[in-house]
Amino acid sequence: MSFNIASKSGAERTAIETEKARLFELRQQNLGRAKVQAAKFFAERSKRKGKWEAWFRTELEALTPVEYASMVRTEVRRLVAEK
């Protein structure tokens, strides 16, 4: 399996580039919102103590699209690491 996009057919390259553009646009449009959501989830950490991780996973599963949920997860991890 080759990861070199140049070795792909024209249709495959177009599909890959279209998906990259979609993900870039999604990130540009939602990064601020993801940071706000992550801060809210992180604020719950001190209130929920040991039950926070299970609660957080449940809340994350409810977020759509999956790419947005991933952005929120990344931001929460960043906040946890900074603490």
Image (tube, rainbow, N blue to C red):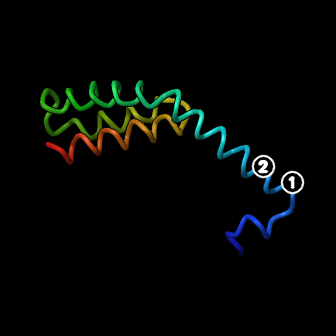
Residue sitting nearer the eye, 67 or 59:
67
x and y, in percent, of residue 71 in the image? 43, 39
x and y, in percent, of residue 73 in the image? 37, 41
Please name the residue shown 27% across and 28% down the image.
39
42 left or right, relative to 27: left
x and y, in percent, of residue 25 in the image? 60, 34
Query: CB of mark 1 within 8 Å of CB of mark 2?
Result: yes
User: In which quadrant will I find the N terminus?
Assistant: bottom right
Please name the residue shown 34% across and 39% down the image.
75
Please name the residue shown 35% across and 30% down the image.
35
**Which three-letter amino acid code belongs to the residue tagged 1?**
Ala
Mark 2 lies on a secondary structure that is helix
Q: Quadrant of residue 42?
A: top left
Residue count near mark 1 (Cα–Cα under 10 Å), binned few <14, some 14–19, many ≥20: few
Mark 1 highlights which residue? 11
- Which of the labelled discs sits on residue 15, or is there none? 2
Residue sitting nearer the eye, 38 or 51:
38
71 left or right, relative to 11: left
Mark 1 lies on a secondary structure that is helix
Residue sitting nearer the eye, 50 or 39:
39
**Which three-letter amino acid code belongs to the residue tagged 2?**
Ala
Q: Quadrant of residue 33?
A: top left
Residue count near mark 2 (Cα–Cα under 10 Å), binned few <14, some 14–19, many ≥20: few
